[in-house]
């Protein structure tokens, strides 16, 4: 039996139904029993500019994406030009034969510098700057063009309307027909995607039939793909994961100000506002929901979340770099006033507005140092969709246990990663009780008489106490007393020591693979999956590699990291930023300097193939002080 | 025994400061309404006004410069049963925090906002605040003020506040009554409180105000109230309030400019979408099972994400 491993890119104009097309493909493969893993790439634009999805289909769960793709589904000319370099030997290019004569110079929504690069590529190899030229160029690299008369295929199927509105369904159906996916699965997917819109379903099903017929008539249809036994699964993004985890973790109020790629988390919560209780609680708890508040700015988002936390409610906010910059002062307040607050920080390409819809991991050092003054915080990050769920629960627990702000980092790539999760486990992470002793009057909120730094948490509505951004006494009143100042500083930082003692190592750093390896990768965030795949591929080549995966940066797992790295042979740091920020943290905390680095900061997702080839170069050349910058991605 | 709404802290405002009258008015209004001290939260910003919560024996948060309103909104939304009051200076609420003041008007969360209006930034030595008129030269300024004056009453009305009033710190009887009304008002209230800064503002002194203030309530035909029963007159009443808000100079109106209970409060709007929101407020929700796990069934809540 051949191993199914299909990489597909569906590209088209933003607003042209790319997500729907990709969703149909994912769902059809899901119906057939396969796992689909994918990511969305898009411009900061509402309609017109190039957007695409890249998905990978396997029988077991994929963890990464790979170039060259097996299918490039181009719903417009830009998608051919933009993805010139993403195809290779055997890649099938499905496109509208009518666009053959389209010229690069007319593709005005391709960024000028990108168009210039494409022009150079084609011109240097003596190909015309047209779609037919681009297709010929791809063909010269082994790709297989599949021109299809989109208009006439659709027109025959639909009862009326504009054929181009069905190009996304057509592109998906052609891909599935060529892959050999049973047409029934595609039709089932359409029924789900367009649920409740019967006439739209009928028209789309007709288009699917036309596509399958076209493939049969033109000898394009693939050998039937066998259906697999499979459990039911949830198709979730990183944004979904964070929303789910927070709701499970007891969150009842979330604030946000719209920003990519964070606001999806909040709107997802709003859409799933009606909480369903676990069976044992269903009779005990009244129906209830989550309050999601869109604020006037990020300053309001963080201060409103802090205000809500003061009544004992579990609260959080979600933002991205520019928004978190505005939150810095409020974050500092949460630090000194010991407020249980979670900030989910979605990282995109910075600085400033940067690459607002693209990937980045450049906010680690910022997250570790946000705000003026010195105060303890917990900083953790997730590397896949499941981690987003359970880390969000843990983040709320940490915030309540240690009474300090917690930053949960998720990179844009992960936020927009779509993965199939077999089970959401409500018993995996406990939810620490938010029970408050009722203290009433004369309550010392900042009681100094503790050994672990943790005083009893108060709640407005139940207790009278004060809070101030000034240094304060045990009651929460302003003080400038020198001794109380010293004791309060020590008390606050003692909580961090307590956290360092209590939080298990598995939640902070993990060594994947054999202890004794020739190569040790070091990473954080969404490179985890691709690196684990690269480790498997290197093993096939006889190279034993492992991965030191870091999840928590404050409190930093110093001893663990030090132990592993001081015994490692060739260490390669992999990050989606310019400075190698994790490597810098490791150097500061352990004194170990990781000299070989694979970095990517062009905003596009890191793929298995590029980490593999960059690692091979480092391994084979026995270079030690080398920095490989990955450049790929449309 | 009745609760003592005073704390035992030494109050460190300057002698003659208008803040004393405001503090006393707040404490008296709480006592007269016989409020449960556990059910009240004071929220302030930065500056002399920011110290107010420390002097009142209810829950208090002395927050960041300009940010008292969103803090207070968060407290109120997580537990709408609480009475939440905001104290802030004119610079705090209408300079650095102006955006929040405007946004809260659109929300109408149900918080009582008191603007300590003395035209200067006192704690930083008397710089001009947004309420100081153009050309005014106080002793703390090296040159006359080169900004024009912001009108707190018309700003609050424009922003959508459903209760807008003005008090004077040396008329505690009137101020106390306004605060009581504002606290019982279901929506958000703005009270512009005129007060002298005896240290830095030698122009707008207690005497200066006393010569000018008069009470809207003394006018027989003054009716600023909109209820469900007279919503049809709302536009006319609003226009009259807005017109009166423009009066400043030789005569300065005080009292209630506008009071509209027909505008739905933010918690009430939220309750239409969040089941049992006002019944089991977020702060009162149980989030763990007896054995310490989540009460949420995520697979059922996110059943729409199920795939084959």
Image (cartoon, coloured by chain):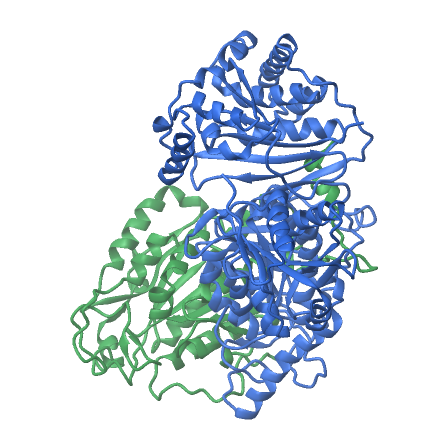
Q: Is residue A367 shown above or below B199?
A: above
The residue that appears at 29% across and 85% down in the rendered structure is B199
Q: Position of residue B211 (x, y in %)?
A: 22, 76
Of the 4 image quadrants, the one containing the N terminus of chain B is bottom right
Left or right: A592 as drawn, with respect to A354: right
Q: Is residue B93 shown above or below B240?
A: below
Q: Position of residue A401 (x, y in %)?
A: 70, 69
Question: In this structure image, what is the colour of chain A?
Answer: blue
Q: Nearer the viewer, residue A550 or A306?
A: A550
Q: Position of residue B7 (x, y in %)?
A: 54, 84
The residue that appears at 66% across and 47% down in the rendered structure is A530
Q: Nearer the viewer, residue B124 or B257?
A: B124
The residue that appears at 52% across and 67% down in the rendered structure is A331
Q: Is residue B197 shown above or below A97?
A: below
Q: Position of residue B76 (x, y in %)?
A: 55, 60
The residue that appears at 66% across and 35% down in the rendered structure is A56
Left or right: B257 as drawn, with respect to A328: left
- Which chain has been coloured green in this picture? B
Q: Nearer the viewer, residue A496 or A419?
A: A419
């Amino acid at each position: 039996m051949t191993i199914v491993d299909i990489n597909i890119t569906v590209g088209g104009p933003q607003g042209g139904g790319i997500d729907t097309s990709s969703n149909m493909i994912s769902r059809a493969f899901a119906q057939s029993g396969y796992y689909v893993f994918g990511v969305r790439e898009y411009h900061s634009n509402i309609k017109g500019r190039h957007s695409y999805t890249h998905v990978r289909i396997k029988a077991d769960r994929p963890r990464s994406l790979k170039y060259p793709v097996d299918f490039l589904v181009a719903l417009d000319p830009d998608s051919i030009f933009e993805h010139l370099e993403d195809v290779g030997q055997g890649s099938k290019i499905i496109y509208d034969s009518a666009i053959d004569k389209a010229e690069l110079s007319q593709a005005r929504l391709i960024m000028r510098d990108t168009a210039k690069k494409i022009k150079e590529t084609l011109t240097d190899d003596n190909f015309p700057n047209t779609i037919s030229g681009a297709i010929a160029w791809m063909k010269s690299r082994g790709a297989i063009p599949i021109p299809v008369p989109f208009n006439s295929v659709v027109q025959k199927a639909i009862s009326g309307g504009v054929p181009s509105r069905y190009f996304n369904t057509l592109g998906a159906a052609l891909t599935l027909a060529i892959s050999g996916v049973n047409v029934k699965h595609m039709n089932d997917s359409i029924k789900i995607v367009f649920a409740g819109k019967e006439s739209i379903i009928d028209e789309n099903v007709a288009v699917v039939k036309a596509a399958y017929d076209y493939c049969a008539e033109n000898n394009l249809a693939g050998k039937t793909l066998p259906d697999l036994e499979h459990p039911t699964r949830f198709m979730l993004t990183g944004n979904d994961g964070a929303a789910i985890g927070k709701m499970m973790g007891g969150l009842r109020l979330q604030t946000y100000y719209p920003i990519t790629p964070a606001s999806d988390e909040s709107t997802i919560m709003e859409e799933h506002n009606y909480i369903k209780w676990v069976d044992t609680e269903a009779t005990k708890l009244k129906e209830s929901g989550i309050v999601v508040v869109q604020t006037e700015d990020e300053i309001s988002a963080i201060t409103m979340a802090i205000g809500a936390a003061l009544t004992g409610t579990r609260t959080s906010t979600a933002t991205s770099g520019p928004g978190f910059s505005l939150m810095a002062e409020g974050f500092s307040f949460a630090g000194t006033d010991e407020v249980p607050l979670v900030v989910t920080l979605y990282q995109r390409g910075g600085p400033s507005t940067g690459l607002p819809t693209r990937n980045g991991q450049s906010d680690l050092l910022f997250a570790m140092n946000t705000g003026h003054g010195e105060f303890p915080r917990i900083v953790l990050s997730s590397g896949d969709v499941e981690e987003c769920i359970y880390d969000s629960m843990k983040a709320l627990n940490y915030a309540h246990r240690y009474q300090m702000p917690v930053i949960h980092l998720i990179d844009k790539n992960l936020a927009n990663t779509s993965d199939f999760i077999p089970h959401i486990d409500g018993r995996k992470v406990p939810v620490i009780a938010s029970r408050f002793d009722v203290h009433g009057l004369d309550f010392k909120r900042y009681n100094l008489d503790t050994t672990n730094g943790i005083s009893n948490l108060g709640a407005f509505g139940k207790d009278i106490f004060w809070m101030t951004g000034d240094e304060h006494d045990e009651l929460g009143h302003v003080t400038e007393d020198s001794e109380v100042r010293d004791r309060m500083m020590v008390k606050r930082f003692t909580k961090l020591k307590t956290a360092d003692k209590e939080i298990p190592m598995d939640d902070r750093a993990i060594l994947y693979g054999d202890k004794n390896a020739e190569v040790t990768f070091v990473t954080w965030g969404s490179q985890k999956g691709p690196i684990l795949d690269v480790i498997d591929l290197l093993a096939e080549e006889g190279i034993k590699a492992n991965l030191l995966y870091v999840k928590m940066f404050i409190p930093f797992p110093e001893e663990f990291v030090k132990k592993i790295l001081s015994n490692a042979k060739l260490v390669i740091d992999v990050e989606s930023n310019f400075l190698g920020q994790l490597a810098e943290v490791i150097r500061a905390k352990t004194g170990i300097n990781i000299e070989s680095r694979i970095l990517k900061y062009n905003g596009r997702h890191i793929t298995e193939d590029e980490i593999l080839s960059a690692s091979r170069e480092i391994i084979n050349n026995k270079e030690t002080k080398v920095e490989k910058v990955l450049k790929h991605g449309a | 025994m009745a609760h003592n709404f005073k704390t035992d802290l030494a109050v460190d405002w300057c002698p003659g400061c208008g803040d004393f009258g405001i503090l006393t008015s707040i404490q008296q209004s709480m006592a007269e309404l016989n409020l449960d001290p556990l059910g009240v939260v004071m929220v302030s910003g930065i500056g002399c006004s920011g110290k107010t919560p420390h002097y009142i024996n209810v829950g208090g948060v002395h927050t960041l410069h300009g940010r008292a309103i969103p803090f207070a909104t968060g407290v109120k939304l997580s537990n709408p049963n609480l009475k939440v009051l905001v104290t802030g200076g004119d610079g705090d609420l209408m300079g650095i925090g102006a955006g929040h003041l405007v946004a809260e008007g659109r929300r109408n969360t149900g918080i009582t906002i008191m603007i300590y209006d003395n035209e200067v930034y006192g704690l930083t030595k008397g710089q001009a605040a947004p309420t100081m008129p153009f050309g005014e030269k106080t002793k703390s300024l090296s040159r006359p003020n080169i900004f024009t004056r912001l009108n707190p009453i018309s700003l609050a009305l424009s922003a959508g506040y459903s209760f807008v009033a003005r008090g004077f710190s040396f008329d505690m009887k009137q101020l106390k009554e306004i605060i009581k009304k504002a606290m019982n008002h279901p929506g958000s209230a703005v009270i512009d409180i005129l007060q002298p800064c005896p240290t830095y503002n030698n122009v707008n002194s207690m005497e200066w105000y006393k010569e000018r203030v008069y009470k809207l309530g003394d006018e027989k035909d003054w009716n600023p109230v909109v209820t469900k029963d007279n919503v049809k007159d709302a536009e006319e009443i609003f226009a009259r309030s807005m017109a009166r808000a423009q009066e400043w100079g030789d005569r300065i109106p005080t009292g209630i400019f506008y009071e509209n209970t027909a505008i739905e409060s933010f918690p009430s709007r939220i309750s239409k979408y969040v089941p049992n929101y006002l019944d089991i407020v977020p702060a009162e929700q149980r989030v763990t099972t007896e054995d310490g796990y989540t009460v949420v069934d995520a697979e059922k809540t996110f059943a729409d994400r199920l795939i084959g």
